Image (spheres, rainbow, N blue to C red):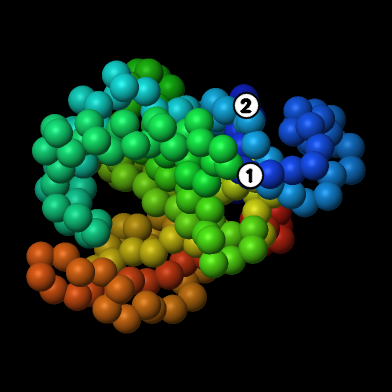
């Protein structure tokens, strides 16, 4: 798994120490501080050779509509294609969540480095039912499918979760028919764990979800 560069970090929740000191300790390799939930780490950016993740901004609405308004993208997602009004509402909620304290959701734009264009988004949300756990999701525009960008984006998101948020377990769920997502998460080191039966209601029908997850030690062993 290729190493990724850290440009900036962000918050998670509530800690007893200055989060800036924690970031500095990680950067120079000093022993990690006691695990806690941090706040005040915004904005978030991470980058690799071909992609960058950054906070969403209002100007991204057209790019997000191009992704989530596309039926090919939403075929295996939990919802139907979004219209512009819905895209604007989602953007507004994500931008507001970025400055919440404590912050529990990280919705980030995926940028193609070569063109500087927004080609999709990814999301990490802290799991309220698991200590140091989180869920992830991702979606890219069909024009960039097949280039390995999905794996690269997921690796960036995992690195953020394990390095910056100091999580223990990160998981994602997919439609049983979404083999592309299965390959992407598998290539990023996420292990298929099982099935949540009749997990999603879409178009009046229930469908299962297949869970993939990775532990921090598994992520470290693949670096």
The one nearer the camera, 59 or 219, is 59
Relative image position of residue 161 (x, y in whole percent) = 60, 47
Circle 1 residue: 13
Q: Earlier in the sequence, mark 2 or mark 1?
A: 2
Relative image position of residue 69 (x, y in whole percent) = 15, 40
Q: Is residue 108 left or right of residue 205?
A: right
Q: Residue at x 47, y 28 (%)?
A: 54
112 relative to 128, above or below: above
Label 1 environment density (alpha carbons within 10 Å; few <14, some 14–19, many ≥20): some
Q: Residue at x 31, y 31 (%)?
A: 92
Tag in front: 2 or 1? 1
Q: Secondary structure at mark 1?
A: loop
Alpha carbons under labels 2 and 1: distance apart? 17 Å
Circle 2 residue: 8
Q: In the picture, residue 90 is in which quadrant?
A: top left
Q: In the picture, residue 115 is in which quadrant?
A: top left
Q: Secondary structure at mark 2?
A: strand
Relative image position of residue 63 (x, y in whole percent) = 24, 28
């Amino acid at each position: 798994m290729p190493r990724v560069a850290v440009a900036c970090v962000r918050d998670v929740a509530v800690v007893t120490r200055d989060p800036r000191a924690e970031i500095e300790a990680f950067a120079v390799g000093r022993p990690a501080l006691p695990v806690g939930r941090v706040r005040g780490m915004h904005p978030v950016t991470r980058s690799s050779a071909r992609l960058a993740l950054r906070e969403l901004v209002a100007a991204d609405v057209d790019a997000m509509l191009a992704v989530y308004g596309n039926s090919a993208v939403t075929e295996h997602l939990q919802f139907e294609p979004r219209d512009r009004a819905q895209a604007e509402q989602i953007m507004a909620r994500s931008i507001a969540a970025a400055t919440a304290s404590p912050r529990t959701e990280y919705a980030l734009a995926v940028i193609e480095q070569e063109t500087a264009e927004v080609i999709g988004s990814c999301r990490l949300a802290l799991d309220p039912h698991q200590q140091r756990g989180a869920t992830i999701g991702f979606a890219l525009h069909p024009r960039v499918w097949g280039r390995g960008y999905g794996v690269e984006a997921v690796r960036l998101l995992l690195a953020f979760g394990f390095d910056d948020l100091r999580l223990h377990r990160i998981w994602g769920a997919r439609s049983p028919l979404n083999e592309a997502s299965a390959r992407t998460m598998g290539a990023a080191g996420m292990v298929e764990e099982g099935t949540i039966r009749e997990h999603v209601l879409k178009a009046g029908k229930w469908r299962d979800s297949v869970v993939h997850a990775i532990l921090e030690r598994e992520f470290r062993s693949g670096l």
